[in-house]
Amino acid sequence: MLHAQSVPYDVFPAAEVPYYRVRYEASKEPGGLIFPVNYTVWVPPGVKTLRGVIVHQHGCGEGSCKSGLTGAFDLHWQALAKKHDCALLSPAYEQPEKADCQMWCDPRNGSGAAFEKALGDLGKASGHPELATVPWALWGHSGGGHWAGGMTLLHPERVAAAWLRSGVPLLKVNPERAAIKAHVIPDEAVQVPIMCNLGTKEGVTVKEGRFAGVWPGNETFFSELRAKGGLVGVAVDPLTSHECGNQRYLAIRWLDACLTARLPDQSGGALKLMSKEGAWLAPLLGTEAVPAAKFTGEVAKAVWLPDEAAAKAWMQYVKDTAVTDTTPPPAPKNVRIEGGELKWDAEADLESGVGHFIVERDGKEVATVPAQPKNPFGRPLFQGLQYSDTPAMPLVRMSFAVTDGVKADGFRVIAVNTAGLRSGK
């Protein structure tokens, strides 16, 4: 049930089918979530039975929390979800500015239980009760990385894969941050593919400043898991600090490889184990990966990558983030005139998303939508990008104003992905 929300969490896209939303007020019970929280889920139209749910978790602070309100509307992440018959879910914790982020980003403080309750309630609302029991693929930024990693350690049997951007759960008590509780690594967690992803300016090449402690935390998390045989890697973004940059072009491909390998063929089955034969390895903070059988370094300290395709994308990403793509995006469909606007439907390219659309009339280009694609953090995107890797608000529409009386005949819409490739007819 939705209740009145306060600034800045009171402006968000409507959740109309195939979107569904639940919101919970702050709990007054001991150990309950002390912040209100809003969960929005997208269910691929036409899917009969869900095989999993992809969770896109924002970071700490009002700005990042607010950005979670659009996460389920991201066309690029929807392409990954649709391919694997998964729902796409984005929470938005209503954390007041300067409040203690640990009160939600540590799932033991009530957010884990609220998340599982939301899966049940959203499953009922969407007609997909299996949502409550399917595996999870977790992506998290900053405090969201802490949350996603914490959920992985608490529920490894449920997690198909986890991508942790600029945040990991604490494994050892830090006297300087005594309020943060440490996690333990259960034996089952070593079977879960995990990627630690951070910007080089977060303690790798820049050793001072607000985010200098991110790399030491990631290095400890990586080393502890790898020493136990964990399937964990590190991908350092060579261009950024704490912002997400171009990480989605590697994260989505990496998750695609892990979901392909691990999701059960039928909903309700157990997660499959990752095959060790196809893995590639690389030196920590290196830029070259090789098949595991050819790796000559210390395996227990090597970056783990699931397969050749993911390894090649990783090698491009850690050098300049320019992950290449040779596949054109899907062509837009259902081009029509409604209410003085040319409208169309389109899905994102799994590899590179949607950069913009070109509108042609009688073979001549008449417009680009949007006129100037923007993204302050990386490749320009049709939907724009907020700090925690979600579409900008208000959501941009697939439309172009036309003169009254004009018919759709003669119009063509071309999708252009962020690699510059155009859709065909």
Image (cartoon, grey):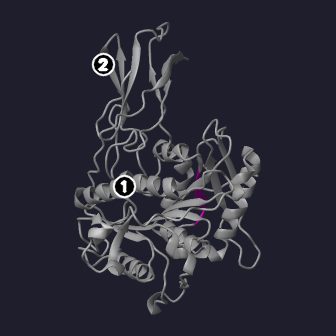
Task: Give how far across and how far down residue 44 sits, in percent.
Answer: 60, 41
Task: Give how far across and how far down residue 16 sits, in percent.
Answer: 66, 38
Q: CA distance from mark 2 to mark 1?
A: 32 Å
Determine which quarter of the picture holds residue 387. Answer: bottom left
Query: Is 394 drawn above or below residue 37 in the view shown?
Result: above
Residue at image location 29% in from the left, 80% down from the top: 298
Give the main secondary structure of the magenta stretch.
strand
Q: Callout 2: few (<14), some (14-19), or many (20+) C-alpha neighbours within 10 Å?
A: some
Looking at the rendering, in which quadrant would you find the C terminus? top left
Q: Nearer the viewer, residue 46 or 206?
A: 46
Provide the residue span drawn in magenta: 88-95
Q: Nearer the viewer, residue 374 or 8?
A: 374
Circle 1 residue: 250
Query: Is 227 drawn above or below residue 290 in the view shown?
Result: below
In the image: residue 285, left or right of residue 5: left
Q: How many numbered discs sit on the rendered protein?
A: 2
Q: Amino acid at mark 2?
A: Glu
Helix, strand or loop at mark 2: strand
Circle 2 residue: 365
Mark closest to the chain's N terminus, 2 or 1: 1
Q: Residue furthest bottom?
A: 175
Marks 2, 1: nearer the viewer: 1
